[in-house]
């Protein structure tokens, strides 16, 4: 399942595999997710999607899917007022994505899908720019499951579509389905809903969580989260990722 657990000869053999090798690159950010959820919520969700996609395609005769080591740091300025965030600049992220994809393509493994679950606009824009850079400078087509594109967002939950999904019901449910031990459920159940439309707030110039009214670094309704909803959402996300894998392959 994991690229980094293969030996060098095993990676070399991928190029001669009758199945098309597709590598998944989980992307996220280390940042506050309320008083109840882990800092690593975003990369944890990305990893969960990748693991489920690999399992679903394990016996597929056409593709061989492997998970690359994650890029767990991202562009994250909005949560700067709270402890725990680790921000990297957009040029750093752009260079990391381009260099990783280039290094893999240079050894005959050009099919890579970015799997991102950190939606701060500058971070998303940087990933999109990296995809364009690889295509324009090298002719390398990279898959990017861009969940904030309307066609993808419409398949996700009501809270996600409302833009209230930072550490709310949507994300907390996913963590409960993947790593329930990392959620403080007593704290979660006591949290009131915080109705913030994050895309609209950012568009009007609110630059950070506090300006948006997110006084505890979350919005939405984490108290309504459940592992069952998380499992159902993971199923939808995995279907979308499998579609992206097949399209790239």
Image: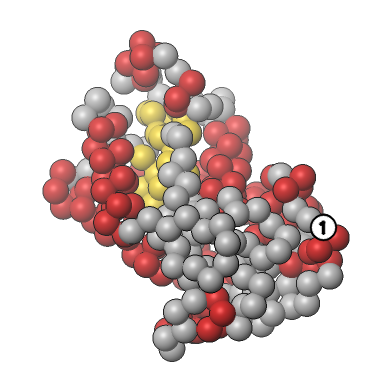
Q: Nearer the viewer, residue 196 or 15?
A: 196
Q: Nearer the viewer, residue 241 or 219?
A: 219
Q: Label 1's element?
A: helix
In this rendering, the answer to whether 65 lies above or below 204 is: above
Residue 134 locus on image (x, y percent)? 22, 48
* Visible residue check, residue 198: yes
**Residue furthest toward the top?**
9
Q: How many circles with numbers are drawn on the protein?
A: 1
* Visible residue check, residue 141: no
Q: Nearer the viewer, residue 179 or 107?
A: 179
Task: Classify residue 80 as left or right of residue 32.
Answer: left
Residue 86 locus on image (x, y percent)? 47, 55
The quarter holding residue 196 reads bottom right
- Please tell me which residue is depicted at 85% across the width and 60% down the height of the picture: 186
Residue position for label 1: 185
- Please tell me which residue is depicted at 84% across the width and 66% down the height of the picture: 189
- Please tell me which residue is depicted at 16% across the width and 52% down the height of the picture: 136
Task: Classify residue 83 as left or right of residue 191.
Answer: left
Residue 128 locus on image (x, y percent)? 32, 59
Residue 183 locus on image (x, y percent)? 75, 53
**Residue furthest toward the left?**
137
Image quadrant in which the C terminus is located: top left
Task: Classify residue 92 as left or right of residue 38.
Answer: left
Q: Is disc 1 surrounded by few (<14), some (14 to 19) or many (20+) residues within 10 Å?
A: some
- Please tell me which residue is depicted at 66% across the width and 82% down the height of the picture: 195
In this rendering, the answer to whether 175 lies above or below 4 is: below
């Amino acid at each position: 399942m994991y690229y980094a657990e293969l030996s060098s000869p095993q990676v070399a053999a991928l190029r001669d595999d009758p199945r098309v090798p597709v590598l998944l690159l989980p992307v996220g950010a280390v940042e506050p997710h309320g008083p109840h959820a882990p800092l690593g919520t975003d990369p944890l969700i990305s990893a969960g999607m990748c693991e489920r996609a690999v399992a679903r395609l394990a016996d597929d005769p056409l593709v061989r899917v492997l998970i690359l080591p994650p890029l767990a740091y991202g562009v994250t300025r909005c949560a700067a007022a709270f402890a725990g965030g680790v921000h990297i600049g957009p040029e750093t992220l752009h260079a990391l994505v381009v260099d990783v994809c280039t290094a893999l393509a240079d050894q005959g493994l050009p099919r890579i899908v970015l799997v991102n679950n950190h939606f701060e606009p500058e971070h998303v824009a940087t990933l999109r720019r990296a995809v364009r850079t690889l295509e324009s400078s090298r002719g390398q087509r990279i898959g990017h499951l861009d969940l904030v594109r309307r066609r993808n967002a419409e398949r996700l939950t009501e809270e996600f579509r409302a833009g209230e999904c930072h550490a709310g019901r949507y994300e907390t449910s996913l963590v409960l389905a993947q790593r329930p031990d990392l959620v403080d459920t007593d704290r979660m159940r006591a949290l009131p809903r915080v109705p913030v439309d994050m895309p609209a707030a950012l568009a009007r110039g609110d630059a950070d969580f506090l300006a948006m009214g997110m006084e505890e670094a979350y919005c939405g309704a984490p108290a309504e989260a459940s592992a069952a909803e998380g499992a159902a959402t993971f199923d939808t996300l995995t279907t979308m990722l499998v579609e992206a894998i097949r399209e790239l392959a």
